[in-house]
Image (tube, helix red, strand yellow):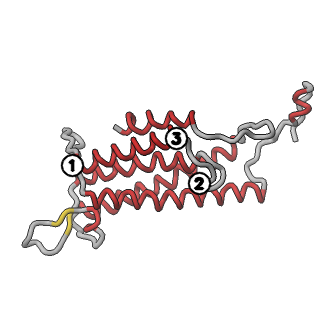
Amino acid sequence: IITILNDGCMLTIARDHVIPAKAPQSWDLNQLRVVATVLGVVPLISSLGLLMLGLNCADGLYPWYASWVGDKVPSGYGDHYYLAYEKLTTLMYLKISISDFLTLFCARTRGPFYERLPSLPLFSAFLFATVVATLVAVNADIYDGTYPMEHISVQAACFVWGWNIFFFLVQDVCKLAIYATFDKYNLFQEKKVDAELLARGNPKQV
């Protein structure tokens, strides 16, 4: 489901708004590797964090936050909330579906994510993929012999959205901090070729 909705819709990045540079551009792979690593680590941490919270709810520990994502246990067992493993699978599915697209919005700009508005095809694809994923999470029961999925509550879906948006903002702040550090200390920069000398057939690294 994630492959069909997210990866397919992400192809619309090819129709995104861009601002042509005034000078010839080249890939600075050293900086690119560092930024890509950080942009991948932040959602990884958020996924592991949500998984840990969900497992605490599913293992019968009855944490105080279980009421946000779980279901109330039958009367007679106290005022507790519980999250079944099948619902936890759905919770993580929705989390990954949303965070994939939010990471794309973070990575598409060097400045803040709101620096340049996304194109209509890209934003429409984002709405389509995430809304469909949310509807699947709150309505569908998927029966599988290995990893069955049961629908979660609307409240749990809203919690996942809020969790993703929070870490998306953290992700964007980390990106800005990395680029600011690069620019201030000239870190991880590859040697560049003088464009004028390259045009004359005499490349010179600077």
Name the residue carrying label 1.
150
Foreground label between 1 and 3: 3
Residue at x 72%, y 41% (from the top left corner): 28
Coordinates of residue 163 in the picture (x, y in percent):
41, 60
On screen, residue 119 above or below 67: above
What is the C-alpha distance between the residues marked 2 and 3? 15 Å
Residue at x 59%, y 60% (from the top left corner): 173
Name the residue carrying label 2.
114
Which amino acid type is marked by label 2?
Tyr
Coordinates of residue 37 in the picture (x, y in percent):
57, 49
Residue 205 sits in quarter: top right
For marks 1 and 3, the one nearer the N-term is 3
User: In the structure shown, which secondary structural element does the residue marked by tag 2 occupy?
Assistant: loop
User: In the structure shown, which secondary structural element does the residue marked by tag 1 occupy?
Assistant: loop
What is the C-alpha distance between the residues marked 1 and 2? 35 Å
Residue at x 29%, y 47% (from the top left corner): 135
Which amino acid type is marked by label 1?
Glu
Coordinates of residue 33 in the picture (x, y in percent):
63, 44
Foreground label between 1 and 2: 2
For marks 2 and 3, the one nearer the N-term is 2
On screen, residue 201 above or below 3: above
Residue 202 sits in quarter: top right
Please tell me how crowded label 1 is: few (under 14), some (14-19), or many (20+) other residues with Cα within 10 Å: many
User: In the structure shown, which secondary structural element does the residue marked by tag 3 occupy?
Assistant: helix
What is the C-alpha distance between the residues marked 1 and 3? 33 Å
Residue at x 23%, y 69% (from the top left corner): 62
Name the residue carrying label 3.
120
